[in-house]
Amino acid sequence: MVFSADDLEQRRAALLADMAATAEAAGRASSGVALMAVSKTQDEARIDAALRSGQRLFGENKVQEALDHWGRRRDLVPDLRLHLIGRLQRNKVADAIALFDCIETVDRPELVDALAARMRTAPRFPACFVQVNIGEEAQKGGVMPDALPGLLAHARAASLPISGLMAIPPHGGPAAPYFALAAKLARRHGLREISMGMSGDYREAIRLGATIVRVGTALFGERPASSVNGEG
Ligand SMILES: *Cc1c(COP(=O)(O)O)cnc(C)c1O
């Protein structure tokens, strides 16, 4: 199918309207939920069209691909906000701190230590969220729910501020119980931001307290079949 920037702009407007209506129906302020455009695997034309439509918050799941997409654009779009939503390897920590405004996938003590050490000397301080493995799935990233308090304590001791939680519910089943659990954990630990909900389930996520929904296909259209979810 031929890509049309007008179609993308219309999909974005419809998404924002639907998000606002969903938030308000749930008794939440529509301003309390942000639309993140997940631009992994998207081509230059689609990314530029999203920017032209007014989109400023973007998510990427791989550091190298994010550099390809955004290394040059960062300077051209001063109000860009870029979040890392895929697994971060320790050897990519310096690149990630230089590029991202938020690292949503802090999930282990060694990564906390590497981020904290680098941020002591880096000129930038991205926000950090902890990714919770909310469905306790072996193949997924994220800290197990019962290890969350320990990881948060470790981050406090290392002076790495954590301001939110990120969660990806198990594929296939109903997501609502997992969203509810993520929201409960965020409240319990005083974490303001909750990044949850994707193209197929962002409404439930908003009803249950998401402050950021991460939307790829519903905004850009289908990704090429080879792309992988999650890991980066
Ligand atoms: C790809 C991806 C998304 C977006 O998924 P869609 O179903 O295309 O909206 C959201 N979150 C993460 C972590 C992803 O890797």
Image: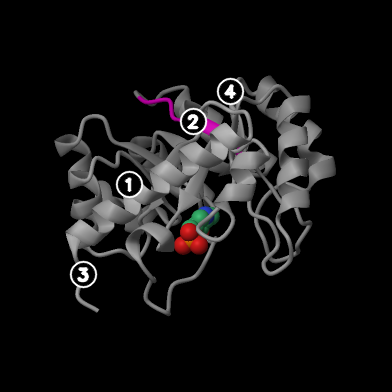
Q: Which residue is mark 3?
A: 3
- Indicate which disc, 1 or 4, sits on the residue closer to the N terminus: 1
Please report the residue visible at 59 percent of the width from the left and 28 percent of the height from the top: 28
Q: Is residue 125 above or below residue 102?
A: above
Please report the residue visible at 32 percent of the width from the left and 46 percent of the height from the top: 13
Question: Where in the figure is residue 205, as x and y percent of width and height?
Answer: 62, 46
Q: Is residue 174 magenta?
A: no
The amino acid sitting under disc 2 is: Ser
Nearest the eye: 151 or 203: 203
Q: Which residue is mark 1?
A: 13
The answer to whether the residue bearing label 3 lies less than 8 angstroms from the nearest atom of ligand 1 is: no
Q: Which residue is mark 4?
A: 161
Closest to the camera, between mark 1 and mark 3, is 1
- Label 4 environment density (alpha carbons within 10 Å; few <14, some 14–19, many ≥20): some
The amino acid sitting under disc 3 is: Phe
- Indicate which disc, 1 or 2, sits on the residue closer to the N terminus: 1
Q: CA distance from mark 2 to mark 3?
A: 29 Å
Residue range corresponding to the magenta coloring: 124-130
Q: Residue furthest left?
A: 76
- Label 2 environment density (alpha carbons within 10 Å; few <14, some 14–19, many ≥20): many
Determine whether the residue tagged by mark 3 lies in a helix, strand or loop.
Answer: loop
